[in-house]
Amino acid sequence: MQLDNAFGIHSQALDLRARRSEVLAANLANVDTPGYKARDFDFQAVLRQEIPALRLAVTQADHLQTEQGLVPPSQMQYREPMQPSLDGNTVDPDLEYSNFAANALEYQASLRFLDGRIKSLMLAIKGQ
Amino acid sequence: MSLFQIFDTAATGMSAQSMRLNLVASNLANGDAVSSSIEQTYKSRQPVFRALLNEINPDDPAVGVRVAGVVESPTPLRREYLPNHPLADKDGYVFRPNVDMVEEMANMISASRSYQSNVEVVNSARQMLSAALRIGE
């Protein structure tokens, strides 16, 4: 058994959850910015993609590796506004905040799964 | 760790909203500052918000906000006939600032609500991070 596989999909899920909370935090910060379009991504669709696709290609030695879990720009989507405002801003603070809270909870759930895996591994290592 | 960026993003939101609140306070404080000419009269000041793009990576979805500038409201000043006022001009008029109290109060509530939602974001992110730190304990 490889240690990478031991954590299953949860480490990637955790990474994406963190990324999504960042996007939603940006939406909430720009709640009063004229012309700002609220953004989000489809968590399931991005997670379903191959995980190596989440990293930028490093074809030159001096390329910097980006953080793991960067959502490809093609996956970023704009929210369809329910009540568009005159200044072109499409952030609905209630929607963003409830999404943020749900995402934070799901992040904690992913953490709990990882925690369980780590604890069972520790149990196997120590044998007591 | 990308969760740390949330603190930066929310902090830009908080500082922009507090700047807005500061301008509301300034407008309300100067709401009755009359003077004898258009140039000398206080004009209502409003912030202009702009999304803060990451210049190194424009596709970075974590976008903060900044106050791009402060504009003075172009609404005409109120002119009032008060010949006994010490600041009245030679025709007996004084000029009152174009501060709309109702608008400023609504602005104040909106700014403080937005500020609070950014604070909540920081709190949630802090909880998420501290849960991540306790993993495997």
Image (tube, coloured by chain):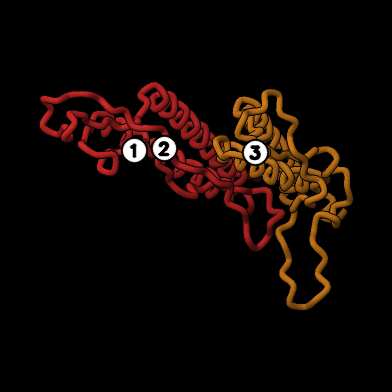
Circle 2 crowding by C-alpha within 10 Å: few under 14, some 14–19, many from 20: some
Q: Which residue is mark 3?
A: A24
Output the letter for the chain in red.
Answer: B
Q: Which mark is residue B43?
A: 1
Q: Position of residue B45 (x, y in %)?
A: 38, 39
What kind of residue is marked 1? Lys
Compare residues A46 and A104 and report the one nearer the observer.
A46
Image colour for chain A is: orange
Q: Dot 2 corresponds to which residue? A: B73
Q: Nearer the viewer, residue A10 or B96?
A: B96
Determine whether label 3 and label 1 are within 8 Å by CB.
no
Amino acid found under the numbered disc labelled 2: Ser
- Of discs 3 and 2, which sits in the foreground? 2
- Image x and y of residue A57, in percent: 82, 65
Decide which of A112, A43 is in the foreground and name it.
A43
Question: In the rendered image, which quarter contains the C terminus of chain B?
Answer: top right
Residue displayed at 17% across by 24% down: B82
Count of numbered badges drawn on the protein: 3
> Disc 1 sits on a residue from what chain?
B
Q: Is residue A92 above or below residue B43?
A: above
Select label 3 or label 1 by which is in front: 1
Circles 3 and 2 in contact, beta carbons < 8 Å: no
Q: Position of residue A49 (x, y in %)?
A: 88, 47
Residue A119 to residue B105: above or below: below
What's the CA distance linking mark 3 and mark 2? 32 Å
The answer to which image quadrant residue B47 occupies is top left
Q: Which quarter of the picture shows residue B19? A: top left
Q: Which mark is residue A47?
A: none
